Image (spheres, rainbow, N blue to C red):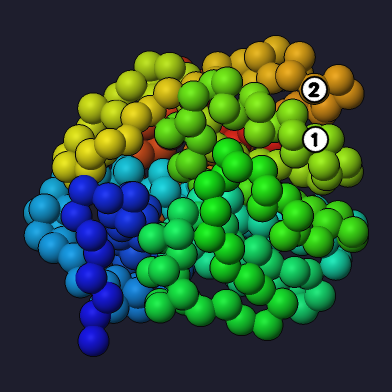
């Protein structure tokens, strides 16, 4: 039996990146392969006719590539942190149906997947928690969830496509609270400049007909803009299309490599890393 996804709901926001990871796995398998996304697409009750119709366009395929590169980048940061903190907490903020934590599992870390209650309902049905793993229903802005995270051996927090929906003040408040509660931890997330965020709001969110969401948080110069938030915080960033790997595979058209450069340089598409 397929799990129904509520239309015009927060649940629906998890479908776009899930579909993107599935399509990128098929179009660019040498760069990215997400067996979980391929499997879960078959298990949700959702009308994919609109995204399928648009999936042949060059811009849509580049969008699939963007989603995949973002996941690869965040996974790199998780694995990098676990090298020095093998028993750390791996915390997926706004997890949807992403299993990056599980794919980075080193056998000793603890994995936490956080999202709104109705999204966690879907996750529990389709991706029930495994060993050393918990699916936690919460509002990220209600920091009572901090007490559920065992960060005694360190913590790496990551958020994929999440903070665009937050007001800048909400992100600042959350970061300041995390820095105080989890010294020595790391937070990584994707961000883009204001123009790119506005474009996102006008394109895929509108095309998906998702209501009641907004895109607010943007970053151009991460170090300059975010360093003042917390005394002693270390801020760095890399372009998320080309900052972690080169797109040299033959399956990646020259057009996509050009768009990747434009995205990283002009649209400031980046992975931001905060070390507390």
Q: Position of residue 182 (x, y in %)?
A: 83, 44
Quarter of the image where the C terminus is located:
top right
Dot 2: what SS? loop
Quadrant location of residue 178?
Answer: top right
- The answer to whether mark 1 and mark 2 are in CB contact below 8 A is yes
Quadrant location of residue 29?
Answer: bottom left
Whether residue 251 is visible here, answered yes or no, is: no
Residue at x-position 72% and y-position 50%: 146
Please tell me the numbered disc located at residue 230.
Answer: 2
Quarter of the image where the N terminus is located:
bottom left
Residue at x-position 13% and y-position 63%: 47
Q: Position of residue 4 (x, y in %)?
A: 23, 70
Nearer-N-terminus badge (1/2): 1
Q: Position of residue 236 (x, y in %)?
A: 73, 29
In the rendered view, tell whether residue 215 sits above or below residue 153: above
Q: Could you say which is closer to the camera, residue 112 or residue 204?
A: 112
Residue at x-position 39% and y-position 60%: 118
Q: Is residue 19 left or right of residue 275?
A: left
């Amino acid at each position: 039996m397929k799990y129904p996804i509520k239309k015009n709901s927060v649940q629906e926001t998890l479908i776009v990146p899930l579909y993107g990871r599935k399509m990128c796995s098929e179009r660019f398998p040498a760069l990215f392969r997400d067996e979980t996304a391929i499997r879960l697409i078959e298990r949700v009750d959702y009308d994919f006719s609109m995204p399928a119709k648009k999936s042949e366009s060059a811009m849509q395929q580049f969008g699939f590539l963007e989603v995949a590169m973002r996941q690869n980048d965040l996974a790199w940061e998780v694995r990098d942190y676990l090298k020095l903190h093998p028993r750390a907490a791996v915390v997926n903020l706004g997890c949807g149906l992403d299993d990056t934590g599980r794919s980075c599992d080193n056998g000793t870390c603890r994995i936490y997947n956080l999202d709104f209650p109705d999204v966690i309902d879907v996750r529990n049905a389709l991706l029930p928690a495994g060993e050393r793993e918990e699916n936690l229903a919460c509002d990220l802005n209600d920091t009572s969830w901090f007490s559920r995270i065992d960060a005694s051996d360190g913590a790496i927090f990551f958020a994929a496509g999440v903070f665009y929906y937050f007001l800048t003040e909400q992100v600042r408040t959350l970061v300041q609270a995390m820095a105080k509660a989890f010294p020595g931890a790391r937070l990584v997330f994707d961000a883009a400049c204001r123009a790119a965020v506005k474009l996102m709001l006008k394109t895929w969110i509108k095309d998906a007909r998702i209501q009641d969401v907004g895109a607010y948080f943007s970053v151009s110069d991460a170090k300059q803009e975010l360093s003042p938030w917390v005394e002693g915080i270390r801020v760095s960033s890399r372009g998320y299309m080309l900052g972690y790997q080169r797109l040299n595979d033959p399956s990646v058209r020259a057009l996509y490599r050009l768009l990747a450069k434009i995205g990283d340089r002009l649209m400031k598409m980046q992975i931001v890393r905060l070390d507390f």
